[in-house]
Amino acid sequence: LLFAVFVVGAIGAGWLQVHRSMPAWYARLWYPLEYEEPIRAEAARYDLDPALVAAVINTESGFAPDSRSGAGAVGLMQVLPDTARFIARQPDRPSPSPERLAEAEVNIAYGARYLRYLIDRYGTVGLALAAYNGGPANVNEWIERARAAGDTLNVPEDIPFTETRGFVSRVQRAVPIYHRAYGDRLFVRSREGASAGP
């Protein structure tokens, strides 16, 4: 009996160590990747880390292209139709109509363009992710509230919305995992052998 307890304990400890270190083979069991070609293409087009785009997709929809939220967000990147119409009026907009938002590749294009817009607007990926999930109006209010108190908004710690704080944390945690697990698929090497990734 003691030997059985020892074996079970050793297996459990070994599993915990693997789970904490998250080697690439193990990470792929927990963090899926699909649609890597459109992810790479749109990330390159909008100067984004493709691992960031993949992490947002996984966190938002788990790579289920027919996902819909109660608030009306659509597809892999959970983009609201109104947001897609807003993006369609921006420079360097995706070429497909925002009415095709339910199509996986179109959804990635609009979601990536929106991420780029938010990063440019707020200056950091953390704030952009908070706005992606919680809405720019809320992020503006949180920034102003922190500024009025003589402070800066620390992301994700100071985000008052539990869902948004969790979203930002999960995406930020997933980005390096996607780098490690799928670097060969997300970052294409040129003919000279230089990596196109960071």
Image: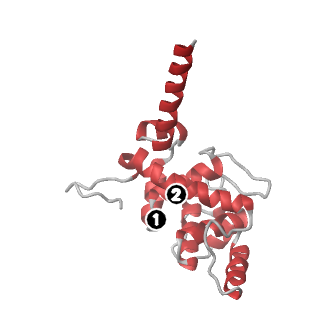
- Asked where in the image residue 119 lies, by quadrant, the reply is bottom right
Question: What quarter of the picture does the C terminus occupy?
Answer: bottom left
Residue in the foreground of this view, choosing between 133 and 73: 133
Are circles 2 and 1 on residues that touch, CB within 8 Å? yes
Q: Is 10 located above or below residue 49 in the figure?
A: above
Disc number for residue 53: 2
Can you name the residue that lies furthest to the top here? 1
Q: Secondary structure at mark 1?
A: loop
Residue in the foreground of this view, choosing between 17 and 171: 17
Q: Position of residue 68 (x, y in %)?
A: 73, 50
Q: Residue at x 55, y 15 (%)?
A: 2
Q: Position of residue 62 (x, y in %)?
A: 61, 45
Say what amino acid the circle numbered 2 marks.
Answer: Val
Please indicate whether residue 70 sits to the left or right of residue 17 in the image: right
Q: Is 172 located above or below residue 124 in the figure?
A: above
Mark 1 sits on what residue? 48
Nearest to N terminus: mark 2 or mark 1: 1
